[in-house]
């Protein structure tokens, strides 16, 4: 007979545990991943609004994104470039409600992604993952608006997804400093660019500076024919018309010379860009990628400047200059890679290549007028002091490169990698100028010249490294050697100068990564890179764009070599709601190309500046640091963020004010910048958000040749951003900031107030009517300081006070989802920036 067994209850058994929410931040090696499900986003939010809520990520008022202290340079959607990697195009237009997660990646290029060898320098890449629930359907946004000061806006977006296909069409027309595309952004391709060939001659200028009228349109297409064959690419066109008015005060260090300038610059830029990518997994062991890129820029400018020069605080001369220029710049590039897995244990063969070609043709028409204090010029009329020139510059450049990598497994966790990299940058340039008219001048032949210069910079890099990948500890150790040749010639009529420089560099290979836990790691990395002199630095003849400004290149220049070391620490604690990011980066440049500046006063001309170049024996270095701590409480209702950093830059230049003597004084310029910020966010629901905060910057400038103790600057900027639902369909928003500037030549302290009220309309809130007021006190301006051999304080106009009324219509329809039903509203294109 089996005895009866009685189980008595135990009082300390654990009760049921309920886990709410999701892990919102995860550290995965070189990637920080943010989930979107816990973010409290308002109806109609775009990706940029979500980025502003992520710890360690900042978005400034111009839409630039920084993450863990470094600028995000490219964007991808589901791992593929979107509009050539254009960051703002994606962040300011992609609806937030269709995003599942956002990743910030330290990207080392396709070679690293395939082989695992993370050598060289990384770039910050934003990867946006679309929620699979939204992979079949479409979304559309249309916005029109008009306002005071003749402001207008018309934008539209349509994006369709069908599992393996994606099409996005964007259009934009406005005069509110809101370009749609950044034509300086180029997709990664199959091989990262290492030289000048193929670089874009255009760019998204304007932004927050001046006033820009823009029109643009673009289409991005992606289609997966199968799991093995995928194609994606984009075409975009933009035309920007910008007018920028600025004033500046420049102090030529150790020269006893200052300048006061007023400028009125007008620029029109038209840009075409096409980029394509084909990825093909031929077999489970063979993979290829091919990426063609085409572009064409046509830019024109009409710039006017009025400059007063003072020597020893006494008026020297006044110069008025007008320069009209026109640039055409076609370019093309193609790159490709092939990867072969030789076995299942890690034996691998990788090959990639690229070819870039770019041409820019520029024509300058310049008119310069000078009034001098010299007694011989005081009574001259305007017709006697004019100088007119016409200059034509043609720059042709191409870059070609290839890499081969072979990986051999030595153990379960260790691999040996042998690499070879070839890179060639070739330049074929001409620069000619003709003096059309000169009165009251001694111009002679210096303004008439015709130069041709053709040179190439070639590098070969051979290296070997051992890579170990353990559960907690990973490292790569090795070395490479890099011989380089800078070779060519420059001619001026019958005179020819030969350029022939050879260098040899030994480059360590070092990378260490330690994983403290699933959410915490530290990475230490070294990289080295050489770069050739620029066209203007190497031309060995005198180039005088006017009688008062001359440059003289140096054919004996060696290329610079930069050593870079970075230390990154990432840590997160989901249970406590804390995150901490820190970064320390140091760079030392050997053979730094520095300028030799001579400023003299000459009879009949006033001040004359001559600039030359040479390699510096002393190391030039910079150190940058960043840290960010954040903590959230009560399911992210309360968030506190504290961070900042310190940067130090050492610069060297040489100065002289003796017309007959070639002795120069060495100027060591040290610039230290301290940045701090403290922000608090109260966000109990999507219907209320309050963000008070303050930023502080203190800059210390020191020069070995002049006392700059009174040149230190500080900037304190408190601000408050918030929004509230007055009713379920009525929203009020406010963005207030005040600057307190000290130490600048002109301490402007603008108080900026932007506000809006928004009303949801139509069935299912498909329409939105918004009234916005920008810069209500009409104090918008921008002040800035740059320091090199010249300390310059500048002020630039920005878009000033105006009011805007806009109407927005949005619609989404996805498989299985009601077209007017959504977790966070219909999303869509951004409103003009507050």
Image (cartoon, grey):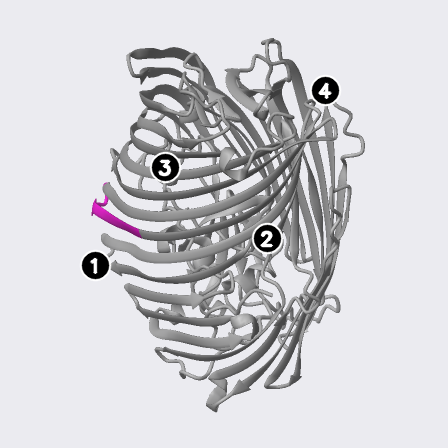
Give how far apart the Cα atoms at labels 1 and 2 are: 35 Å
- Label 2 SS: strand
Q: Say which quarter of the image contains residue 459.
A: top left
Point out the stretch of residues depicted in magenta: 273-285
Residue 730, given in percent of the width and then of the height, sits at 61, 84
Q: Earlier in the sequence, mark 1 or mark 4?
A: 1
Q: Disc 4 designates what residue?
A: 705
| Residue 816 x %, y % | 37, 80
Q: Is residue 782 above or below residue 1?
A: above
CA separation in Å, label 2 and label 3? 25 Å
Sequence order check, earlier mark of 4 and 2: 2
Q: Assess whether mark 3 and mark 4 are in contact (beta carbons under 8 angstroms).
A: no
**Disc 4/disc 2 C-alpha distance (Å):** 40 Å
- Examine the structure image and report whether residue 27 is included in the region drawn in magenta: no
Q: Position of residue 648 (x, y in %)?
A: 67, 31
Q: Which mark is residue 192?
A: 3
Disc on res. 537: none
Q: Earlier in the sequence, mark 3 or mark 1?
A: 3
Residue position marked by numbered label 1 in the rendering: 225
Mark 1 vs mark 4: in front: 4
User: Could you tell me which residue is drawn at 39 percent across and 20 percent down?
Assistant: 464
The residue at which mark 2 appears reads as 57
């Amino acid at each position: 007979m089996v005895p009866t067994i009685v189980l008595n209850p135990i009082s300390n058994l654990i009760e049921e545990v309920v886990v709410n929410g999701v892990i919102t931040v995860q550290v995965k090696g070189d990637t920080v991943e943010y989930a979107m499900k816990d973010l409290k986003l308002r109806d109609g939010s775009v990706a940029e609004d979500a980025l502003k809520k992520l710890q360690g990520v900042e978005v400034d008022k111009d839409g630039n994104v920084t993450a863990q202290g470094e600028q995000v340079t490219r964007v991808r959607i589901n791992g593929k470039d979107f509009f050539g990697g254009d960051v703002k195009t994606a962040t300011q237009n992609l609806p937030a409600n269709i995003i599942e997660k956002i990743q910030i990646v330290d990207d080392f290029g396709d070679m690293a992604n395939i082989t695992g060898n993370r050598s060289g320098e990384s770039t910050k890449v934003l990867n946006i993952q679309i929620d699979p629930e939204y992979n079949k359907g479409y979304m559309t946004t249309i916005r029109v608006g008009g306002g005071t000061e003749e402001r207008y806006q018309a934008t539209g977006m349509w994006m369709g997804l069908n599992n393996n296909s994606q099409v996005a069409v964007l259009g934009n027309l406005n005069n509110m400093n809101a370009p749609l595309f950044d034509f300086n952004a180029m997709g990664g391709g199959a091989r990262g660019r290492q030289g000048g060939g193929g670089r874009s001659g255009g760019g998204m200028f304007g932004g927050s500076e001046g006033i820009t009228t823009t029109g643009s349109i673009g289409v991005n297409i992606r289609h997966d024919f199968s799991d093995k064959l995928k194609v994606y690419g984009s075409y975009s066109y933009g035309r920007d018309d910008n007018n920028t008015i600025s004033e500046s005060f420049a102090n030529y260090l150790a020269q006893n010379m200052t300048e006061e300038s007023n400028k009125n610059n007008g620029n029109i830029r038209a840009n075409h860009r096409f980029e394509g990518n084909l990825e093909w997994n031929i077999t489970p062991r063979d993979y290829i990628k091919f990426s063609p890129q085409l572009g064409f820029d046509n830019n024109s400018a009409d710039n006017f400047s009025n400059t007063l020069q003072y020597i020893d605080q006494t008026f020297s001369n006044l110069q008025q200059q007008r320069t009209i220029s026109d640039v055409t710049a076609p370019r093309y590039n193609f790159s490709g890679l092939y990867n072969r897995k030789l076995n299942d244990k890690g034996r691998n063969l990788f090959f990639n290549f690229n070819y870039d070609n770019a041409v820019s043709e520029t024509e300058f028409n310049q008119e310069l007028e000078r009034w001098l204090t010299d007694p011989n010029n005081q009574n001259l009329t305007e017709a006697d002091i004019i100088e007119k020139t016409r200059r034509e510059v043609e720059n042709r450049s191409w870059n070609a490169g290839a890499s081969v990598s072979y990986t051999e497994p030595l153990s379960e966790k260790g691999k040996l990698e042998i690499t070879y990299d070839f890179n060639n940058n070739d330049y074929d340039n001409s620069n000619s100028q003709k003096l059309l008219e000169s009165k009251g001048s001694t111009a002679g032949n210096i303004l008439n010249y015709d130069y041709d210069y053709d040179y190439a910079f070639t590098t070969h890099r051979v290296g070997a490294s051992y890579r170990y990948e353990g559960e907690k500890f990973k490292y790569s150790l090795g070395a490479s050697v890099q011989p380089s040749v800078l070779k060519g010639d420059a001619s001026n009529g019958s005179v020819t100068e030969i350029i022939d420089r050879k260098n040899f560099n030994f480059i360590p290979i070092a990378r260490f990564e330690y994983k403290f836990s699933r959410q915490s790691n530290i990475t230490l990395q070294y990289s080295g890179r050489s770069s050739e002199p620029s066209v203007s630095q190497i031309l060995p003849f005198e180039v005088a764009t006017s009688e008062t400004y001359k440059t003289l290149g140096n054919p004996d220049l060696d290329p610079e070599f930069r050593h870079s070391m970075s230390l990154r620490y990432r840590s997160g604690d989901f249970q406590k709601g804390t995150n901490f990011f820190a970064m320390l980066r140091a760079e030392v440049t050997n053979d730094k190309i520095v300028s030799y500046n001579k400023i003299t006063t000459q009879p009949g001309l006033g001040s004359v500046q001559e600039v030359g170049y040479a390699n510096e024996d002393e190391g030039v270095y910079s150190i940058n640091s960043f840290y960010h701590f954040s903590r959230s409480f009560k399911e992210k209702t309360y968030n506190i963020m504290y961070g900042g950093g310190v940067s130090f830059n050492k610069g060297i230049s040489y100065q002289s004010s003796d017309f007959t003597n070639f002795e120069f004084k060495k100027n060591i310029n040290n610039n230290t910048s301290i940045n701090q910020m403290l922000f608090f966010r109260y966000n109990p629901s999507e219907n209320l958000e309050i963000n008070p905060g303050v930023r502080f910057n203190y800059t210390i400038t020191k020069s070995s040749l002049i006392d700059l103790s009174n040149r230190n600057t500080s900037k304190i900027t408190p601000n408050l951003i918030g929004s509230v639902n007055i009713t379920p369909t009525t929203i009020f928003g406010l963005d207030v900031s005040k600057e307190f500037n000290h130490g600048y030549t002109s301490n402007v302290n603008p108080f900026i107030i932007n506000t809006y009220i928004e009303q949801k309309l139509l069935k299912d809130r498909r329409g939105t009517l918004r009234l916005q007021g920008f810069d209500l006190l009409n104090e918008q301006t921008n002040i800035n300081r740059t320091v090199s051999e010249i300390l310059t304080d500048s002020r630039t106009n920005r878009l000033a006070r105006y009011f805007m009324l806009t109407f927005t219509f949005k619609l989404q329809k996805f498989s299985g989802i009601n077209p007017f039903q959504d977790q966070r509203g219909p999303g869509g294109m951004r409103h003009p920036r507050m």
